[in-house]
Amino acid sequence: MKSIPFRNLLALVGLAAPWGAFAESPNIEFVEYDLPNGLHVILHENSDAPVVSSYVLYHVGSKDERPDRTGFAHFFEHLMFEGSENIQRGQIDKLISGAGGNLNASTSFDRTDYYINLPSNELELALWIESERLMHAVIDETGVETQREVVKEERRSRYENQPYGSIMENMAGAVFAGTPYAWTPIGSAQYIDEAMIEEFREFYKKWYVPNNATLSIAGDIDIEATKRLVERYFGEIPRGPEPERTEMEWDLSAPVTAKRAEEPMTPLPATVHIWRAPVLTDKDAEAMDLLMNILAIGKSSRMYRRLIDTERAAVNSAAFSWLQEKAGLVAAYAFGNRGVTIEQLDLLIEEEVQKLIDEGVTERELQKALNQKESEIASSVGTMSSRAQSLAYYHQWYGDASRVNNELEAYLKVTREDLQRVAKTYLVKEKRNTLHYPVPEQ
């Protein structure tokens, strides 16, 4: 149930929303303020349905870990469901499901978050649980030992015992080498095993403080009444020290690498081309997103049409972006048909990327990518849960929650000239990292 937001590579092609008709994005009105203890609060009132969503974003992810204690942020995602001083072990899930709701959590390089969806008359239950997690979480040997095994099993099942399971870790290790992004949120089972109980308690004290969190609530609420509830449950939690963060420089011209991943379960040859990319808030971020869409997202993308429809060389191909708070990468990949060599796949991808650099994109391709992005943005705020998350997301990373209403504007400013410039800047062969998955010899 509680899982990090990475899926295996075969699922990544499903990230893009389909083309087609879409509703106009609503204007999302909200109020936001800070409690004296530093907790940032965002409230959005919508009475279309008697539901409410609470969302808490902690500004701590795997990049904030020590290199010899990776996996702590993700471990805490699990540990925070154990219970608190006032909630018995294993009861959080039962309390929410018993009230007709659902909940989950996730961990990324930059953040850990928790959401609860409930009937609107149960909002107080969600706030009580989140305040308990923030102030009174129980970190004891029983909970830690239980979650050690849960996390190790998740690692085995998702990363070690399935085809291409190492791909995320290999990509991060290659492109983010020398930075705190070089390991993925799942972390190392070794370090989780080595950690002592006091290390977990210190991590909690450092990062789980109100001045390192954003609380976003969306749904059938009364704003003033909700403010009083927030004050009741969070107002007395003391402010913590400002967490000390690891400083890093993001060098877009770092040396490239090539890696051959030998995995016994690899069913088809696969290649991944990876480039360092700008950070999430960079002026080129939207252009990079659209460019990768045109290259390899969907059946009308260049790589799909060339590698699958025309050449019959691959059974699947796609591209995706990891643009983070302080670093970024983009990648294009292909799974080859049997009998197709990795070298053939590499050459075909190289040719399609080089066309972007030399010739740019057509007006039709740009418009199609913009249509898809508009549909994606509109659908991303279709539920109260997604609205709560989006408001917190834009506040945390852009310092502007109102971007939830105008994100599309940044994409509409992108021109064909921008796309070709970005291709020439970031996607050149000299800056490309490669990752190969050959089929084991029988």
Image (cartoon, rainbow, N blue to C red):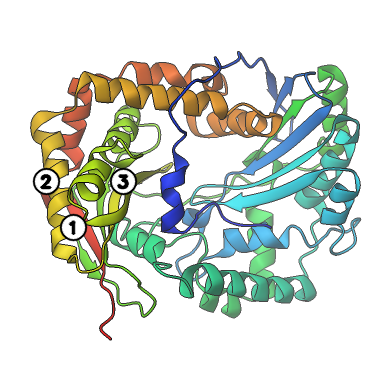
| Mark 3 residue type | Val
Find numbered disc 2 in the image and state the secondary structure of the residue it sits on.
Answer: helix
Pick the front one: 298 or 188: 298
| Mark 1 residue type | Leu
354 sits to left or right of 49:
left
Point 52% across, 64% down: residue: 186
Which is nearer the N-term, disc 1 or disc 3? 3
Position of 27 relative to 187 (above/below): above
Point 34% across, 34% down: residue: 289
Q: Are marks 1 and 2 in contact (CB under 8 Å)?
A: no
Mark number, residue 345: 1
266 sits to left or right of 105:
left
114 sits to left or right of 190:
right
| Mark 2 residue type | Glu
Pick the front one: 79 or 309: 309
Q: Bin the neighbour count of mark 3 within 10 Å (Cα to Cα): few under 14, some 14-19, many 20 and up.
A: many
The residue beneath circle 3 is: 330
Point 20% across, 44% down: residue: 306
In which quadrant is the N terminus drawn? bottom right
> Residue 206 location, x and y as percent?
63, 54
Which is nearer the N-term, disc 3 or disc 2? 3
Find numbered disc 1 in the image and state the secondary structure of the residue it sits on.
Answer: helix
Mark number, residue 233: none
**Distance from Cα at disc 1 to Cα at disc 2:** 10 Å
Point 18% across, 43% down: residue: 427
> Residue 83 location, x and y as percent?
83, 60
> Residue 187 location, x and y as percent?
50, 66
314 sits to left or right of 205:
left
**Distance from Cα at disc 1 to Cα at disc 3:** 18 Å
The residue beneath circle 2 is: 351
Find numbered disc 3 in the image and state the secondary structure of the residue it sits on.
Answer: strand
Pick the front one: 408 or 21: 21
